[in-house]
Amino acid sequence: MLEFFGREEPRKTEFEELTLPYLDSLYGFALVLTGNSDDAHDLVQDAYLRAYRFYHRYQPITHYKAWLFTLTKNLFINRYHQRAREVSLTSLEIDDDAPYESPRDLLVAASGRHEKGLFRQDFDWAMAAMPEKLRLAVLLKDVEGFDYKEIAEIMGCPLGTVMSRLSRGRQLLKKSLKDYWVGAPPLRPAEHARTERV
Amino acid sequence: MYDCSTVIKLLHPYLDRELDVKESVRIQTHLRECPYCREMFSAEQVFQDLVRQNVAPPPAPEFARRCVTAALSRESRRPRLQRLRGRPARIAAGAGAVAAAAALVIVLVGVFTTAVPGLVTLAVAQHRAYLDHPDSLEVTGGDVAVVAARLEERLHFKLRLPAEPVADLRLIGGRVVEDGDRRAAHLVYRLGDRQTVSLLMTPPQEVRVSGRNAIAFKNILFNPADIAGYQTLQWSDRRHTYVLVSSEPGAVYQACVICHGSGQSRDAIAGFTSGT
Ligand SMILES: [Zn+2]
C-alpha cells in the first residue's frame, strides 16, 4: 500500500520535468488556436491535466513536445466544436502557384529597422496579420522546429497541405514585411484573411 | 536534371531538410551551376533565420504556470483508481447539476481551517453588516442589469452576473464597499427561503492559496475557510476575485452558480452552471 502511493510524487516530478519546459510554447500555440488569453489559459491547463492522465496509462512516449501539441489541438477541437469544423475543412487545399517572392529586396529594406531594434515588433505585427492556419504552420515549423510529418499530425491535415501553408505563410510574411518596410500601405488583416483559400 | 522553376518549388522542403537524399543531391547540383537560384536560396535561408529569431511567442503568464502546477498537484493526490478511469464524467446541465456539483465540492472539502487573507475578512465583515442592517444596501431588487449598472457607476471594473435567475438564488441587492483605496462590489442573495449569501467581487487579486485546503475543480482553485462561524469560499479567475460568505453550512457551494452561470469561457466549470 505504501509503495502504491509512494510512487505518485516521483512520477509527477518526472512528468513535470518532461513537459513543463514546453509550457511557453504550448501557451503560444493555444493563443493562436483560441485567439484570446482566457481560453488559451483554460486550454493549456486542461491539456496538461489530460497529458498527465495519459502519461500514467501509456508510458513510453517518444516525442513529448509533438505529443503535447497534438493533444492540445485535439482538446481544442473537442471543446470548441464550432470552430473545430472550420479547422478541419482542410482536405482540398490547392496551392495557388503565386509567384515566388524573393527575400533579397526585403533584406535590403530590413537593414535599417534591424539597427534600430524594431525587428521584433515588425515580425509580431506581420505574424498577427496572417490568417490563423498560415500563422500556425510558420509557428510550428520556424519557431517550434517540428518536421512536416509532425505538423501534419498536429494540424490534422495532409502533408501536402502543410507544405502549401508553409510556403504561402512565408510568402505572405515576406510580402507584409516588405510592403511595410518599403513604405507601401500594408495589407490589413481582413484583406489577408480574404485572400486565404481553404 | 531540375530546371529553375522546379528547384524554386522545392526551396522550402530543401531548406527544411524534408527532401530525400536523391532530391537533395539534384538540388545541390543545380545550385552549383545556377547563380540565380543559389542567391535565392541563400537569401531565403537568411530570411528563415530572421523568422526563427524574431517570431518566438511571449512566455506564458506566471499565473498560467501556477495554475498548471497547482492542477497537477491536485491531480496527483487523487486516488489512483479514480485517476485511471480518467476525469469524472461531466455533470449534465440541468436542475440536478447544481446540487450534484455542490455535493461533489462538499465531499472534497472535508474539514478546513486556513490562514485568512484580508479580502475574506472584509467579506465576512460586510456580510455581518448586512445582516445587522438589511436596509444598508445602495440598490435593491432582483433585476441584475439594474443592480449591476448602478454599482458599476462607482466601480472601476465590470460586474459579470447571470441575467437569469439561477436555481434557488434570488438577488436581493448590492452596494459598493471601500477597503483602503480599492473598491469591491458586495452583492446579497437569498438562497431558498431564509438563507443569506454574500458575494464580494473585486478585480483579480493575488490570492494566497493554502495548498492543503485548496480545491481544484474544473480549472479554478477554490480556497475555503471557516471564520467566526461563517463559511467562506474564495477564488479568482482572470476577471475577478470572489468571496462567498454564508452562515449556513454548504450554502456557499450551492451559491457558486452565481458567478459561473455566465461568461464566455465558462464551459470549463459547466458542472456549476445550470441549464445555460
Ligand atoms: Zn536555377
Image (cartoon, rainbow, N blue to C red):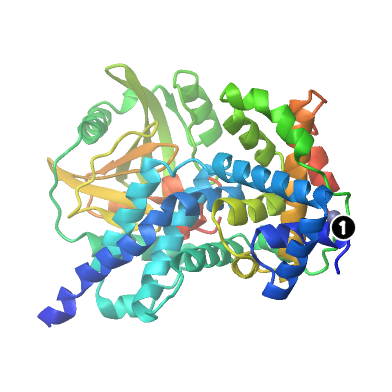
The residue lying toward the viewer, choosing from B90 and B103, is B90
Residue B220, percent from left and from top:
37, 51
Residue B242, above or below A69: above
Ligand 1: quadrant of the figure = bottom right
The residue lying toward the viewer, choosing from B66 and B203, is B66
Question: Residue at left 36%, top 42%?
Answer: B62
Residue B85, percent from left and from top:
37, 80
SS for tag 1?
A: helix
* Quadrant of image for the N terminus of chain A: bottom left
Distance from mark 1 CB to nearest ligand 1 atom below 8 Å: yes
Count of numbered circles on the image:
1
Residue B185, percent from left and from top:
38, 28
Question: Residue at left 66%, top 27%?
Answer: A111
Q: Quadrant of residue B115?
A: top left
Residue type at numbered disc 1? Cys
* Quadrant of image for the C terminus of chain A: bottom right
